Amino acid sequence: KMESILLSLVSSYLKDYVNNFRKEQISVNFLRGQGVIRDLDINVDAINDTIFQSGAPGLRFTRIIVNTLSIDAPIMSLKTKPIVVHIDEMFIEIGEVIEILKTQKDNTNTKKSTSKYGFLDRVVDSMSFEVNKIFVALRTLGK
């Protein structure tokens, strides 16, 4: 039961970041704090919008493929053990863009939060990422 609830939550979030996402791509074991997602075709528009907000570099991701992403999150001991995200193989294609699009500056209040460093902050800070292989292709416009 808990796995299906977690699967629904994760699935609703991943639909924004993974093209043609299907629930069958995920396997979750909530009690062990483990999850595996296979054959991810990442939505590069969402990633580009997040990473290149300033429009500064003349590069954009054109394709990102991840064969297997696994997460080990020791639910019962998050205070003492880190969450580990492991990626087996990742293919990244980066393309040069003809013109750099100017984005509107964010007009939100830039006032820093005065909240305390809490449990969630400690969990995120202790996360680690491991990647076996990364293949990067750079597509330039050339002359």
Image (cartoon, grey):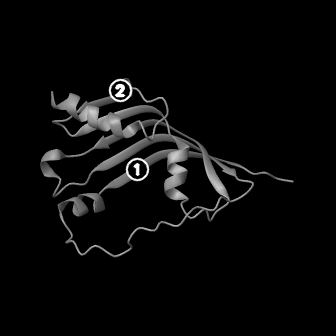
Say whether residue 30 is left or right of residue 16.
left
Please give the residue where the numbered disc 1 appears in the rendered image: 130
Residue found at x 18% / y 61% = 119
| Three-letter amino acid code of the residue under disc 2 | Lys
Q: What secondary structure is marked by label 1? A: strand
Say whether residue 37 is left or right of residue 140.
left
| Three-letter amino acid code of the residue under disc 1 | Glu
Looking at the rendering, in which quadrant would you find the N terminus?
Answer: top left
Query: Disc 1 to disc 2, how far (Cα)?
Result: 24 Å
Looking at the rendering, in which quadrant would you find the C terminus?
Answer: bottom right
Residue 23 position within the rendered picture, expressed as x and y whole percent measured from the top left: 35, 26
Image vertical order of residue 43 relative to residue 108, above or below: above
Residue found at x 51% / y 40% = 43
Say whether residue 36 is left or right of residue 16.
left
- Crowding at dot 2, Cα within 10 Å, few <14 / some 14-19 / many 20+, comes out as some
Residue found at x 25% / y 54% = 82
Residue 102's disc number:
none
Q: Residue furthest top?
A: 24
Say whether residue 77 is left or right of residue 36.
left
The answer to which of marks 1 and 2 sits earlier in the sequence is: 2
Please give the residue where the numbered disc 2 appears in the rendered image: 23
